[in-house]
């Protein structure tokens, strides 16, 4: 049959082909062979990929198109595999850097360089004073202690620290209200907002567990208020600092933040018979009026689930350890708190026993209570009162605090003048209450008022350490930076 009769009428091949059975072709190489020399029909192909479209071109062009399509497909697969392999094997290398290998070097290099610069940017610098320590204090007193607690609070004050003050339930209601009013009316305390009064007073008996309970209460208040502090220190109204807060903060900024200052020993000696074996009940747990502890007739054996330790009731606890004993995610602090509820003078053993039976905290124990204390021989329930005659021993101790002092003892005035810079250095004023309040503070780097007065607050991280810092630093050399630190832990 002539060629003209095969292709006339817009597709007579489709009508006479024995393979189609009268169906309209849907493409494919069987119908649109790239080797055909005849003129294509006007019907557009509806499938067949590159091979279908190649039937519409001359044979040379069709072959080239098919080869290019295959090359494009192969390139796409190669590119996908390369990118996938790069992202999988190196998470730190961005996809943009991987793609740069397949693009012109100028654009790819710029892309990679910009990404590398972004990745290598230095982290933001810490704010000023980020490395300066921050302390949290509990200052507690009882009946008749209002004025000397107020004096001790001002001698300890620094706007960087936090303070909880407490007059126990034995103090008259008028004294407790007066303490709250003084704190509320102090322009400095209102401005900085770092002094909190425990208004619902606790009953505190030194020989029973209520002092431990009160200390844990203060820790909980401070943790609820802020976690931005490094050490908790408990003091009484009869304690007094032997150096400025600038001295203390400067030295504490140079030691590890996990150190716990807890005087302790595992040798009970006479305390085994007079402290550990008796069973007592403290009426302060349930009575509104203070009463002395009373003894139960039955005595108990020493515990075998944990080892007892004893020491000083005055401690400097790291915030990490304070959280451990307050939150109690381990049951040890809770178990020991119940055990020491019936223990004579439990403040002298609770914190020591918790720390030394918790392996995590044993390497943090510094065997010192941060106090200079003079005991009678043999020691009694309380240490003897310090006087002016004890000043040389106070200075040699290097301790930041001393106890105990009689109310308004001349030794306090000597400490103010010689060790605390004159408590404001006689900064003058207009005779107002604010001026008198400013004169009670110990001068430091934060005092930026006229003549360096403390009526105005500057940056709380600016410190001006003095001779007290050198004494305290020598103490830290002995108890933290020496072999004694590891050799005296929980022994």
Image (spheres, rainbow, N blue to C red):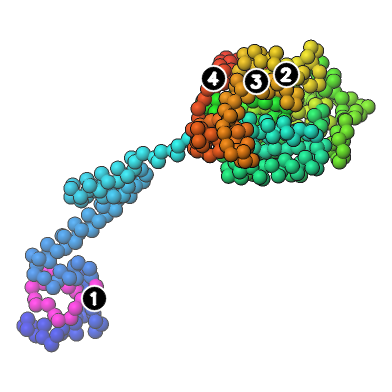
Other residues around mark 3 within 10 Å, as few (<14) / some (14–19) / many (≥20): some
**Residue 414, numbered circle:** 3
Quadrant placement of the N terminus: bottom left
Q: Which residue, as the protein is rendered here, is positioned at the far bottom?
A: 9
Residue hosting label 4: 467
Mostly what secondary structure, the magenta segment? loop
Please report the residue visible at 51 percent of the width from the left and 32 percent of the height from the top.
452
Between the C-alphas of marks 2 and 4, the distance is: 22 Å
Q: Which residue is situated farthest in the front direction here?
A: 430
Instruction: Decide whether residue 249 is among the magenta residues.
Output: no
Q: Residue 304: image x %, image y %?
A: 78, 25
Q: Which residues are magenta?
A: 31-47
Classed neighbour count for the residue bearing mark 4: other residues with Cα under 10 Å, few (<14), some (14–19), many (≥20): few
Q: Which residue is mark 2?
A: 386
Residue 181 in which image quadrant: top right
Point out which mark residue 46 bears. 1
Name the image quarter holding residue 399.
top right
Marks 3, 2: nearer the viewer: 3
First in residue order: circle 3 vs circle 2: 2
Q: Earlier in the sequence, mark 4 or mark 1?
A: 1
Return the disc, 2 or 4, that comes first in the chain's sequence. Answer: 2
- Describe residue 200's horizontal placement relative to residue 74 as left or right: right
């Amino acid at each position: 049959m002539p060629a003209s009769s095969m292709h006339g009428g817009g597709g007579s091949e489709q009508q006479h082909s024995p393979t189609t059975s009268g169906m309209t072709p849907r493409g494919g190489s069987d119908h649109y062979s790239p080797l055909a020399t005849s003129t294509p029909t006007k019907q557009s192909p509806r499938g067949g990929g590159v091979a279908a479209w190649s039937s519409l071109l001359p044979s040379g062009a069709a072959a080239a198109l098919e080869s290019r399509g295959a090359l494009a497909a192969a390139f796409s697969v190669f590119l996908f595999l390369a990118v996938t392999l790069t992202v999988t094997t190196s998470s730190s290398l961005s996809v943009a850097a991987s793609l740069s290998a397949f693009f012109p070097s100028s654009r790819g290099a710029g892309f990679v360089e910009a990404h590398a610069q972004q990745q290598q940017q230095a982290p933001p610098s810490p704010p000023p004073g980020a490395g300066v320590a921050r302390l949290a204090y509990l200052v507690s007193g009882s009946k008749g202690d209002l004025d000397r607690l107020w004096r001790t609070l001002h001698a300890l004050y620094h706007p960087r620290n936090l303070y909880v003050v407490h007059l126990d339930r034995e103090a008259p209601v008028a004294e407790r209200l007066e303490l709250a009013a003084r704190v509320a009316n102090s322009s400095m305390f209102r401005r900085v907002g770092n002094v909190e009064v425990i208004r619902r007073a606790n009953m505190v008996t030194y020989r029973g567990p209520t002092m431990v309970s009160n200390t844990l209460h203060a820790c909980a208040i401070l943790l609820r208020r802020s976690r931005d502090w490094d050490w908790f220190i408990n003091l009484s109204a009869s304690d007094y600092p032997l150096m400025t807060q600038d001295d203390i903060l400067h030295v504490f900024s140079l030691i590890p933040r996990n150190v716990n200052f807890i005087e302790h020993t595992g040798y009970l000696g006479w305390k085994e018979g007079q402290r550990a074996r008796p069973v007592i009940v403290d009426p302060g747990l349930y009575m509104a009026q203070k009463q002395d502890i009373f003894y139960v007739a039955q005595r108990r054996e020493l515990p075998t689930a944990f080892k007892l330790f004893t020491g000083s009731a005055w401690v400097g606890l790291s915030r990490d350890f304070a959280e451990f004993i307050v939150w109690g995610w381990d049951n040890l602090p809770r178990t020991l708190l119940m055990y020491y509820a019936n223990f004579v003078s439990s403040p002298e053993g609770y914190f020591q026993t918790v720390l030394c039976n918790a392996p995590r905290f044993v390497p943090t124990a510094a065997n010192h209570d941060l106090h200079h204390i003079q005991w009678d021989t043999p020691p009694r329930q309380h240490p003897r009162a310090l006087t002016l005659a004890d000043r040389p021993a106070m200075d040699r101790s290097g301790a930041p605090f001393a106890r105990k002092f009689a109310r308004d003892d001349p030794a306090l005035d000597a400490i103010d003048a010689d060790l605390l810079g004159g408590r404001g250095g006689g900064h003058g004023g207009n005779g107002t209450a604010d001026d008198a309040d400013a004169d009670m503070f110990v001068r430091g780097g934060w005092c930026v008022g006229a003549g360096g007065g403390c009526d105005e607050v500057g940056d709380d991280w600016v410190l001006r350490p003095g001779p007290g810092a050198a004494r305290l630093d020598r103490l830290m050399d002995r108890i933290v930076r020496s072999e004694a630190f590891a050799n005296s832990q929980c022994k």
